[in-house]
Image (cartoon, rainbow, N blue to C red):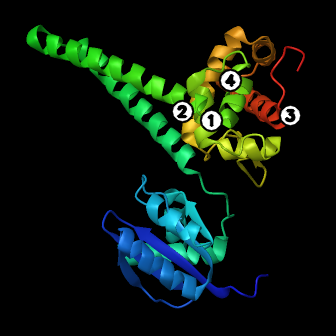
Amino acid sequence: MDTTLADVYVGIDVSRSTLDMDIYPGSNVAQFPNDEGGHARLVKALSALGPRLIVLEATGGLELAVVAAMATAKLRVVVVNPRQARDFAKALGILAKTDGVDAHVLARFAEAVKPELRPLKSADVMALEAILTRRRQLVEMLTAEQNRRLRATGPIMKDLDAHIAWLKQRLKGVDRDMNGAIKSSPVWQAKANLLLSVPGVGMVTTVTMLAELPELGTLNRREIAALAGICPYNHDSGGHRGKRAIRGGRSTVRAALYMATLTATRHNPVIKNFYTKLVNEGKVKKVALTACMRKMLVTLNAIVSSQLPWNVAR
């Protein structure tokens, strides 16, 4: 145990304009502006305190700047899923929800759970993730407009057609940005080439893996499956044996992997044969597809780890 660290834990609730900090054990709430000056003051206070762990919730990007400031100062900081923190609060019987209360819950979460420290994403990875997020937004808008067009008439249809055409052009532009970001990095290009060698894996899946699953190739098969949320968990109690189901994990990674696996069941001989075998054994198609997703992810993990491209013999 590092004796240079104080035996305290810090929770920070992030909003657009403020940062609410609380310390556990005890209760020492302080508020800082969520701007460059506020970040500097917060880092100075935390550096003097030297807490064992600092926990924040992911807040759609509002936390990125302050997390970067704390990481630069070599502070031990972890960003957690908001659902985990909220479930923890309910378990404590804390139903109120204010910025100060949320900071207190996060500090107690840090002390009780001690979430694992993970390397923070680099600026390049965050930029790639932003491009990927924008692409998802454009696809969602395009789908919505195309659905509206099915019921539109007259001038509304013309307006929708114009917007649909614009969205398609922006989508092409984002795809160019995405490809350019990959090609600008020799390391990413090498990993992309390995992933793209697998039948069924396209550029969107590849970029999703690079940006949102940077641990690919560094973990074992069980750890990577759990991280992506495709590791089945038991639902048993007493003599009851329930159906195992997947849950948690990174939903964007899981969605990209689903589409890649769906394609692979038609065009990747290994995944296709595995899927057919499971269905012929009586597995429900959804269950068989989930098993194929796990097999696909484990294969991608092994490929990146070994630095060897896919081949049918694998």
Q: Secondary structure at mark 4?
A: helix
In this view, the residue in front, 1 or 252, is 1
Residue occupying the point 57% across, 67% down: 72
- In the displayed orientation, state which residue is furthest to the left: 155
Q: Residue at x 43, y 30 (%)?
A: 135
The label number, if any, that marks residue 181 in the structure image: 2
Mark in front: 4 vs 1 = 1
Q: Earlier in the sequence, mark 3 or mark 4?
A: 4
Q: Quadrant of the N terminus?
A: bottom right
Q: Residue at x 47, y 82 (%)?
A: 22
| Rendered view: 308 above or below 14 | above
Residue contact between numbered discs 1 and 2, judged by CB atoms under 8 Å: yes
Q: Earlier in the sequence, mark 4 or mark 1?
A: 1
Per the rendering, the mark at residue 185 is: 1
Residue 177 spot, x, y in % from top left: 46, 28
Q: On the image, numbered disc 4 is attached to which residue?
A: 289
Give the residue at mark 3.
306
Give the image quarter of residue 204: top right
Q: Residues within 10 Å of mark 2 (few under 14, many from 20)?
A: some
Quadrant where the image shows the C terminus: top right
